[in-house]
Image: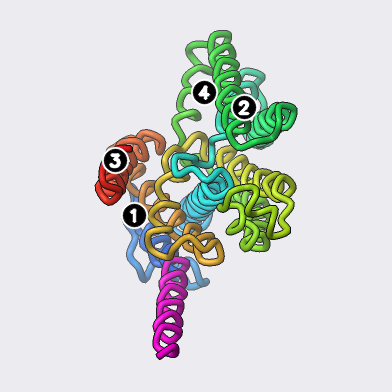
Amino acid sequence: MRALPGRAERISQVRRAGLVLGLCLLPLPILFGSLLLGRVQLGAGEVWTALFGGAVPETMRALVWRVRLPRLVAAALVGTNLAVSGAAFQGIFRNPLVESRILGVSAGAGFGAALAMVLGIAPAGLQILAFAGGLLAVGLAVLLGTAFGGGILVLVLSGVLVSSFFSSLVSLVKYFADPYVQLPGITFWLMGGLSAVRWSQVWPLAVASGVGLVGLVLLRWRLNLLTLSEPEAQSLGLSVRKVRFAVVVLGTLLTAAAVSVSGVVGWVGLIVPHAARALVGPDHLLLIPASAGLGAAVLLLFDNISRTALPTEIPLDILTGLIGVPVFFLLFMRQLKKGGGWR
């Protein structure tokens, strides 16, 4: 009699593992299909030949390798980073409304980017300053939270305060910016987009993404323990504050690297982890790769809509808000209905 539940559980684990593998591979066909789309339509055979060294016109090869592919790789990495950091933060803060920007990283990155534009710094310098601004904002939030006890609520409040402070700094920089040249650039960067991405920006993003993802995978079982209450986790031998700090650092690295390339992109870090959790469960061994694959696929689809729906590109943050808010509302109402109403 005892063998049946064990067998059923094993079958369930195999199914979840297969689903995770499918989610991890899902971005590949979407990425290939995305290479066909754009102002210049390409055939699947032409793209395949351009990718793998066949005889195609040099302009077509340049379009695939220098324009579309770096943008799509960046979209996949940005989606991965936002979704995985959102899943990790929801776990350590034990709050389903937490997302990857909770500690002020986007506001800090926005300040760094705005400052770079006002100072006339080259695009590479803009990416560095945006990345540094994101790290600075989260560092300040963690410092304030630690100084006042280091509890979850204190950290969240510190993140809100720091985010508001850096948002005010962005407004200050915009006030002094040239209204005809610099101000439009700052505004459009803050709306999010990948139109100007090149390989020189993708490689640093890929390195930061690899470090952050590997680190969170190595901490996966500790992340599971952090979803318990702090006394329970400590009773199991976990150094809660040290592990929480490590997760915050890795999640911030992922988010800051993403935002420094794409600008501000909302909702992906909130909704995708919920969807992945509904599919594979709360175990971070499965949740992290599932969130990574689903986040990459979702942002690739959003980017396709951004660059093909209208004659001019739609900023990503507008799209994620227009689509993400209704989706989140439906998920929230469904969860509310399951729980028997508002409590």
Residue neighbourhood size for the residue with mark 4, other residues' Cα within 10 Å, grouped as few (<14), some (14–19), many (≥20): many
**44 vs 223, nearest the viewer:** 223
Say whether disc 2 or disc 3 marks the residue closer to the N-terminus. 2
Left or right of 211? Residue 63 is left
Q: Is residue 6 magenta?
A: yes
Q: Are marks 3 and 4 in contact (CB under 8 Å)?
A: no
Residue type at mark 2 is Ser
**273 vs 306, nearest the viewer:** 273
Q: Which of label 2 and label 1 is nearer to you?
A: 2
Residue 329: mark in rendering: 3
Would you say residue 111 is visible in this rendering?
Answer: yes
Residue 37: mark in rendering: 1
**Quarter of the image containing the C terminus?**
top left
Residue neighbourhood size for the residue with mark 3, other residues' Cα within 10 Å, grouped as few (<14), some (14–19), many (≥20): few
Examine the rendered structure and indicate whether residue 189 appears above or below residue 213: above
Left or right of 207? Residue 65 is left
Residue neighbourhood size for the residue with mark 2, other residues' Cα within 10 Å, grouped as few (<14), some (14–19), many (≥20): many
Residue type at mark 1 is Leu
Identify the residue under disc 2.
158
Residue 108 lies, in percent from the top left, at 61, 28
Identify the residue under disc 4.
186
The CA distance from mark 2 to mark 1 is 43 Å
The CA distance from mark 3 to mark 4 is 30 Å
Q: Which SS does the magenta portion mostly show? A: helix
The CA distance from mark 1 to mark 4 is 28 Å
Q: Is residue 220 magenta?
A: no
Residue 291 lies, in percent from the top left, at 48, 57
Residue at left offset 42%, top offset 40%:
267
Left or right of 260? Residue 340 is left
